[in-house]
Image (cartoon, grey):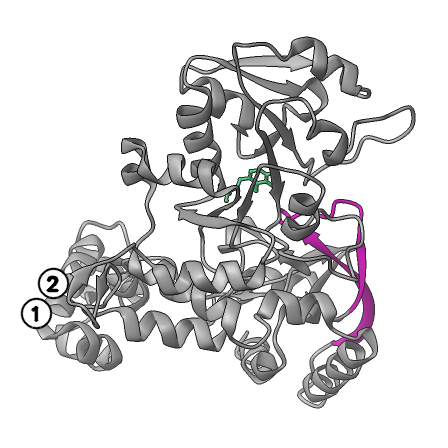
Amino acid sequence: MTDPRRRVPRTDAVLAALDAEVAELGHDTVKAAIHTAQQQVRDGLLAPERVVDRARAVLRTGPRPVLNATGVVVHTNLGRAPLSAAARAAVQAAAGTTDVEFDLETGLRRRRGLDTLDAVRAAVPDAQDVHVVNNNAAALLLCAIVLAGSRDIVVSRGELVEIGDGFRIPDLLSSTGARLRGVGTTNRTTVRDYAEAVSGDTGFVLKVHPSNFQVTGFTSTPSVAELSGLGVPLVVDIGSGLLGPHPVLPDEPDATSVLRSGASLVTASADKLLGGPQAGLLLGEAKLVDRLRRHPAARAVRVDKLTLAALGATLRGPRPPVVVALEADPSDLLRRAERLAQSLRAQGIDADAVSSVAVVGGGGAPGVELPSAAVSLPETYARPLRVGSTPVVGRIDHGRCLLDLRTITEPDDDLLLDAVLSVD
Ligand SMILES: *Cc1c(COP(=O)(O)O)cnc(C)c1O
């Protein structure tokens, strides 16, 4: 009787546990997944009591929603910016056929995503024109292909950076056939270094914001204003996607200030501090934007209607969750942590409210600490919370599992509470 093959759960019993999946995906699909799991039990690869979980795993088709309790506001591994309610609604509405490239008034074709482009222009009046691509890497790629071709991109050696997971901006740029011309040194580069490198064979000068590290001590690098007079286009990759200055992050570059200082083009991600969907923004001189968007390569990096819908709604709608997280008042966070910890203690769980430190993360502002508050649990909670039905990702600190509330929106507090209570 210990042979697991004799204890394969009956299909009907498993189906009953998966009625939500049946309602969503249909009977046949769910049954096929159950059969896969049952076969694994017969083959001795799966414990009989895991059949429901395995069938669910077989049915999973994409990223699952998780609660980000890490205190890292823009967490690349957790999909960066969560969309605002307005952006989610806009995605839902745009999921069918839309006027993405069509003028309903005249019945003629019109520029793709025009309403969204207008929303970006309204947010950054200093940009003469705007183009939106798949992500910031695509924006840089397009600049290299169109503005440099096989000519030089002049860039400081201190800005030849790796963004993460082995993605290096210099490799991306040189993959297009453009020649990278590094100037200056890791810690110091002067306007003169740039001026000496610029020639008739220069496509553009690139300035890259070191968004995930700091170089301190004997350092210097010219300002955007100083680089704008070199007689070639100046492209500035600001990374984070702040459209205007933000009081919480005074040292983070923003599109408006950089354009006012004389940049020809700004490139940025839309899913970092802007708090929108994955996209790359190109803002600046109309003449350059026009060349970028009309080049054949633009087609390969164009955004879809869902992204355009989400981006427009992020810009026009209320503050997205990333901005709410940046601006949260630490005393409010502590009050929420205390309420949660108290409810958990009432159920006999070893929980405390503690102060903590959150960070912006991959989105920029390295070194900036955001005072925060967290629910502190025994470290043994970390894994069960991650694999629960509402996965929660916290952070381990000094043998405790911290659930940082700066990256949880207040309406999700009860969801977080339920997730902790369902750990057994
Ligand atoms: C994040 C980042 C990128 C890459 O942006 P994606 O939108 O992820 O492609 C490029 N440059 C800088 C400075 C960044 O911070």
Side of 267 relative to 327 (left or right): left
Q: Secondary structure at mark 2?
A: helix
Whether residue 180 is situated above or below residue 219 in the rendered picture: above
* Mark 1 and mark 2 residues within 8 Å of each other at the beta carbon: yes
Single out the residue that lies furthest toward the right. 217
Q: Position of residue 200 (x, y in %)?
A: 54, 10
Can residue 389 be seen here? The reply is no
Q: Please give the name of the residue rendered at 51% of the width and 65% of the height, measured from the top-left corner.
A: 82
Query: Which three-letter amino acid code belongs to the residue tagged 2?
Result: Ala
Q: Which residue is mark 1?
A: 28
Instruction: Work out whether residue 203 or residue 216 is closer to the camera in this orientation and state it.
Output: 203
Tell me the amino acid under the disc marked 1. Asp
Indicate the position of residue 101 as horizontal and vertical percent values: 24, 59
Distance between the alpha carbons at the discs numbered 1 and 2 = 6 Å
* Magenta segment includes 356: yes
- Give the crowd class for mark 1: few <14, some 14-19, many >=20 residues within 10 Å: few
> Who is closer to the viewer here, 184 or 29?
184
Q: From the viewer's perspective, tell me whether residue 398 is left or right of residue 53.
A: right
Residue at (12% x, 74% y) in the render = 26
Q: x%, y% of residue 66?
A: 49, 65
Residue range in magenta is 351-372
The answer to which image quadrant residue 406 occupies is: bottom right
Q: Is residue 150 visible?
A: yes
**Which residue corresponds to mark 2?**
32
Where ligand 1 lies, by quadrant? top right
Question: Predominant secondary structure in magenta?
Answer: strand
Measured as percent of width and height from the top left, residue 231 is found at 63, 22
Tell me the residue at 51%/53% (across/down): 270
